[in-house]
Amino acid sequence: MRISRLLAIIALALAGVWFAAEPLLVAQARRHVQADGIAPQPGWGRLGLALSGATLPTRAGPLVLPGLDLWVTPLAPTTLRAELPAAAFLDAPAGRRQIGMEDAVAAVTLSPLGAARQASASFAALALDGAPLSGQGGVTARRVADDRLSGHPLQVRIDLPDLRLPQARSATGGLRLWLDRAPGLATQAPPAVLGVMTEGLEIDTGGFTVRLAGQLSKGADGLAQGRVALYSGDAAAMLDAAIGAGLIPPNVRLLARAMLNRIGQMDFASGGEEWPVMPPAAQGQVRIPLEMRGGRMYLGTIEIGAAPAWPVP
């Protein structure tokens, strides 16, 4: 009897704390969240916010969400769940874009200090300005320990088997990202990517499949540095895609094919002991080696120009 009474007292105390936290949460959100309307989540099983007209900062511009539900549950108080609206609006420098999101949900598990430990997002479909981008897909990320590059490492899994892009039909595989700061709820601006590594990101272009492996990072000069290998079983289709995209003039098709096959047998321009080892192409495949170092870019052992600027400031 004493044990049951004690459990009842504990349950009542937890319930009191749970319900007392709700008005405090709403009050804090009204001070720090940019939204037209902020209300508590309905029902006793959720502690969270129902937002309308919320604006979130992104590196591409402000993202306006007509509605956004955020909540935690008593059984998982450190996992923040989100239900996203059917459409959002990105105020990009070139103008407003509409992002369609069908059945889009997300979840973030936080440490006691508020840093994100793992996150996931999934959707039934994505569209941009009414044009389909993807069918069902999802992305997951989790914090890992890896000091090969400076920054805060995340292991990301991409599962996009039904892309509707002209250049890609699917993208699946793992990426390791190094961020300039740990992502979390207290972050004022989205973290910037300092480096990326993959051992096998596969992209189906519709005409051929290419596998990417390599490691790239932001150099001290703001340029990309590292090496990437592209593996494909259809070098001719890869070349035709490059010609169709306007990267290679059509009148040099035969010469370019001969060069492509020769480059596919080349090694990288330098030893690159600090970068992951990338195996040669399997039987029936071609490996295209790209390297960026010292501000220059190399295709195999051939210098082809300046290394590109790192895309994230």
Image (cartoon, helix red, strand yellow):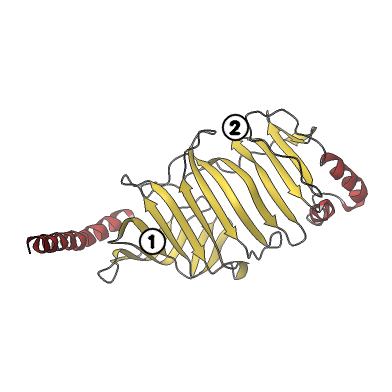
Q: Which amino acid does label 2 sit on?
A: Gly
Residue 54 locus on image (x, y percent): 40, 62
What is the quadrant of residue 176 in the picture?
top right
Question: Residue at position x 81%, y 36% from top?
Answer: 266
Report if residue 176 is visible in the image: yes
Of labels 1 and 2, the one closer to you: 1
Disc 1 packing (10 Å; few <14; some 14–19; many ≥20) = many
N-terminal of the pair, mark 1 or mark 2, is 1
265 or 62: nearer the viewer: 265
Residue 286 locus on image (x, y percent): 80, 46
SS at badge 2: loop
Image height of 139 relative to 145, above or below: below
Q: Which amino acid does label 1 sit on?
A: Arg
Residue placed under numbered mark 1 in the picture = 81
Image height of 99 relative to 143, above or below: below
Residue placed under numbered mark 2 in the picture = 219
Question: Residue at position x 63%, y 44% from top?
Answer: 199
Residue 242 locus on image (x, y percent): 79, 52
Disc 2 packing (10 Å; few <14; some 14–19; many ≥20) = some
Q: For the N terminus, which image quadrant?
A: bottom left
Which mark identifies residue 161?
Answer: none
Relative placement, left or right, of 107 versus 127 is: left
Relative placement, left or right, of 192 versus 185 is: right
Question: Residue at position x 62%, y 63% from top?
Answer: 161
Q: For the C terminus, which image quadrant?
A: top right
37 or 103: nearer the viewer: 103
Question: Label 1 vs label 2: CA separation?
Answer: 36 Å
Question: Are the two marked residues, 1 and 2, in contact with CB atoms closer than 8 angstroms?
Answer: no
Residue 93 locus on image (x, y percent): 56, 54
What is the quadrant of residue 204 in the picture?
bottom right
SS at badge 1: strand
38 or 253: nearer the viewer: 253
